[in-house]
Amino acid sequence: MGTEDSKDPFKGVDWKAVGSDMQKDPGAKPVIKKRLPRKMRQIPDYYFLPRRSLPSAIGFYGACIAGGIGAGMLLEIWINKKIKEDGGIIWEFDK
């Protein structure tokens, strides 16, 4: 078995350097190519809310809330009008 180890011509070969400049000139230092950093991905804190300044966010969401309240008030007026037209009866079960 000891004779097998001595016959191995590739013992001690740096396989990472095979085919590169280090194989031709073993005294040279390995060249490390520096890569530019990839573009950093900016992850927002909240995916479902747009990032706005505080005053514009208050104005936008306040307008949405006021619009919803106004639509609810109009719906309530329409329902009350329909009830008055029908004589105050909402459901009739005797028919």
Image (cartoon, helix red, strand yellow):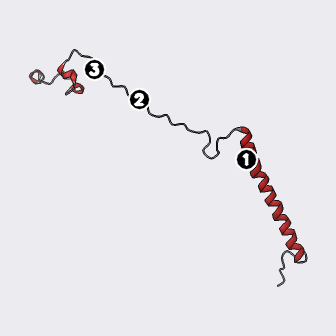
Q: Earlier in the sequence, mark 3 or mark 1?
A: 3
Q: Quadrant of residue 31?
A: top left
Considering depth in this image, is 21 or 45 the residue closer to the camera?
Answer: 21
Report the residue that reaches farthest toward the bottom.
95
Q: Residue at left 20%, top 27%?
A: 18
CB-based contact (under 8 Å), mark 2 and mark 1:
no
Considering depth in this image, is 25 or 16 the residue closer to the camera?
Answer: 25
Q: In the structure shown, which secondary structural element does the residue marked by tag 1 occupy?
A: helix
Q: In the structure shown, which secondary structural element does the residue marked by tag 3 occupy?
A: loop
Q: Is residue 22 left or right of residue 70?
A: left
Q: Amino acid at mark 3?
A: Pro
Q: Amino acid at mark 1?
A: Phe
Tell me residue 95's x, y (percent).
82, 85
Quadrant of the frame with the N terminus: top left
Tell me residue 91's x, y (percent).
83, 76
| Image position of 11 with respect to 83: above or below | above
CB-based contact (under 8 Å), mark 3 and mark 2:
no
Q: Quadrant of residue 3?
A: top left
| Image position of 82 with respect to 56: above or below | below
Q: Amino acid at mark 2?
A: Leu
How many numbered badges does the structure rendering display? 3
Residues at marks 2 and 1, CA–CA distance in whole angstroms: 41 Å
Give the residue at mark 1. 60
Give the residue at mark 2. 36
Q: Is residue 80 left or right of residue 41?
A: right
Between tags 3 and 2, which lies in front?
Answer: 2
Give the residue at mark 3. 30
Residues at marks 3 and 1, CA–CA distance in whole angstroms: 59 Å
Q: Residue at left 67%, top 40%?
A: 52
